[in-house]
Amino acid sequence: MEFSSKLLENAVNEMSQLPGVGKRTALRLVLHLLRQPEHQTFQLAQALSKVRSEIKFCKSCHNISDREICEICENPNRNKELICVVEDIRDVMAIENTSSFRGLYHVLGGKISPMDGIGPQDLNITSLVEKVKLGNVKELIFAMSPTMEGDTTNFYIFRQIQDFNIKTSTIARGVAAGNELEYTDEITLGRSIIDRVPFEASLKS
């Protein structure tokens, strides 16, 4: 792809690093921004800069937040004895959109995947086990995507906390095996949370 401007080429190269954005799409987006009023482009750049420099991760659940503790963890109306364990922030958003869950979350930041070089030590598992040890959590809901890596992660955590007096459950398999949680429709995902099953039962299926 030939460019008449080095500045344009650099902008396209940077934009094309985004997931699912090829060089042609990146060029279309950059040209679109050039046609917009200058202040709109600067607002976009400023918003992206602030996201990168000022955003925080909740010290309790590891969700994205503007403060040290996120709004969900601070909400007095949430059930703090119930924690939903998810892979990443997108899963929190997906479950929140169902309006079917009123507990707290714990974001692992990924899933165990030896093929990708990701082990338990790379995830937020230690802090989850520490929460369980405090004795304030009554139930963990494993809401990982129903893939081999998700199931492996669930089982690893289950082994870490099985000696504590805590209930463990997993979302019902209304979510098709192999599907990522964030792409599941809200009705199916909501029912999967409500109709969750004991984790031990899922091991036998």
Image (cartoon, grey):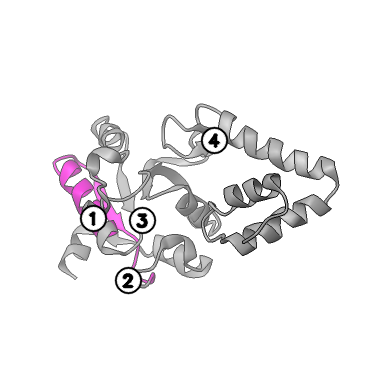
Question: Which region is colored magenta?
Answer: 150-175
Q: Residues within 10 Å of mark 1 (few under 14, many from 20)?
A: few
Q: Which residue is mark 3?
A: 143
Q: Which residue is mark 1?
A: 115
Inter-mark Cα distance, 2 to 4: 31 Å
Mark whose residue sits in front, 4 or 3: 4
Residue pushed farthest right?
37
Indicate which disc, 1 or 3, sits on the residue closer to the N terminus: 1
Mark whose residue sits in front, 1 or 3: 1
Mark 2 and 4 residues: CB-CB less than 8 Å, in contact? no
Q: Which residue is mark 4?
A: 65
Mark 4 and 3 residues: CB-CB less than 8 Å, in contact? no
Left or right relative to 138: residue 69: right
Q: Quadrant of the C terminus?
A: bottom left
Tell me the amino acid under the disc marked 2. Ala
Query: Where's residue 72, x and y in %?
Result: 52, 39
Tell me the amino acid under the disc marked 4. Ser
Q: Quadrant of the N terminus?
A: bottom right
